[in-house]
Image: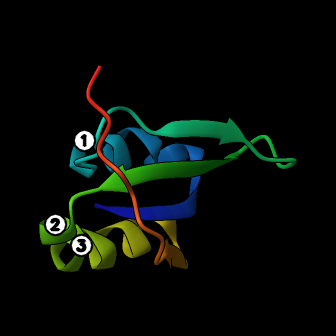
Amino acid sequence: HLHIYFNVHRSNLSMVLEHLTSLKRPTISPLSDPDWYAINTIIRKADYHKLVPRLSRLGQGLVVHEPRQVLDIEN
């Protein structure tokens, strides 16, 4: 799994959430500009190359990947 985060405009938020294959559910935080949100989530490594270009386009910018070890914890 990989940890990614990016910003998205309110107008693209629902489209981003439709395409996002997160491990559980993403964290969505409002930014200081009320039209923008920060998305923070864990995705499968296998989905990375397919998702990042799409998320970058919908997020209108940068998608940051943090190369940390993400441990799968079952509930």
Percent position of residue 26, x then y: 44, 39
Instruction: Say which residue label 3 marks.
Output: 48
Which mark sits nearer the N-terminus, 3 or 1? 1
- Asked which secondary structure carries label 2, the reply is helix
Instruction: Say which residue label 2 marks.
Output: 47
| Residue at 21% across, 59% down | 44
Q: CA distance from mark 2 to mark 1?
A: 14 Å
Which amino acid, by three-letter code, is at mark 2?
Asp
- Asked which secondary structure carries label 1, the reply is helix
Percent position of residue 2, x then y: 35, 65
Image marks 2 and 3: residues in contact by CB distance under 8 Å: yes
Q: Which mark is residue 18?
A: 1
**In this view of the protein, which residue sits in the foreground, 72 or 19?**
72
| Residue at 46% across, 43% down | 13
Q: CA distance from mark 2 to mark 3?
A: 4 Å
Question: Counting other residues with Cα less than 10 Å from the Cα at mark 2, is it few (<14), some (14-19), or many (20 or more)?
Answer: some
- Asked which secondary structure carries label 3, the reply is helix
